[in-house]
Amino acid sequence: MGAIELSVDGVDIIGKAEADDVETLWAYLANMVEEFRANRNSSTLFPDQPIELSFKGIERGRVLVASTVNGERRAAPVDENELFAALTRAGGEFFDKMETMVQRFYQLERSKLSPR
C-alpha cells in the first residue's frame, strides 16, 4: 500500500487518504498517459477501490485532471506539458526505487511516461 499525491492548482486530486496498491496504480497512470497522447482522453479506476481518475483534453495544450472519490468530484485544469513532465519525473523516481528493491525492470511503464 502507498499513495500518490496529485495536486493541480491547489486542488488535491488524489492524496494520502486514497492509499492503494501504488505499484499497480503507477502502471495504470503510465497507461493513462499513453492513452491520452493517442486520444486526448483517458481514465482508470484505482486497483483496489472505486476511485476514478481521468485526463481530458479541454483546449489546446490544457488537460482537465479529475477524480471521483466517494461521490465527490475533484477537478482542475493544467498545462499538458507541465502535467506529463511531473508524472514522468515522479514515475521515474518511483520506478528507480522499485527496481532497487525488487530487482524488476519497468521499461514498458517508463516508455509510456516518456515524452514522444
Image: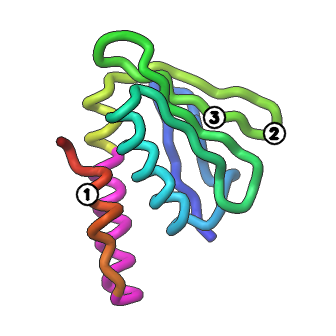
Residue 41 screen position, x and y as percent? 47, 28
The one nearer the camera, 33 or 3, is: 33
Q: Badge 1 is on which residue? A: 111
Residue at the right extreme of this rendering? 71
- For residue 101, what is the image quadrant? bottom left
Residue found 23% across the figure and 50% down from its top: 114
Distance between the Cα atoms at labels 3 and 1? 24 Å
The answer to whether residue 96 is left or right of residue 116 is right
Q: Secondary structure at mark 3?
A: strand
- For residue 3, what is the image quadrant? bottom right
- Quadrant for the C terminus, please: top left
Residue 46 screen position, x and y as percent? 65, 53
Cβ atoms at labels 2 and 1 below 8 Å apart: no
Position of 75 relative to 113 (above/below): above
Q: Badge 2 is on which residue? A: 70
Residue 7 screen position, x and y as percent? 49, 36
Q: Which of marks 1 and 3 precedes in the sequence?
A: 3
Q: Secondary structure at mark 1?
A: helix
Q: Badge 3 is on which residue? A: 67
The one nearer the camera, 114 or 91, is: 114
Q: Which residues are magenta?
A: 87-103
Q: Which of marks 1 and 2 precedes in the sequence?
A: 2
Residue found 71% across the figure and 45% down from its top: 51
The residue type indicated by label 3 comes to: Ser
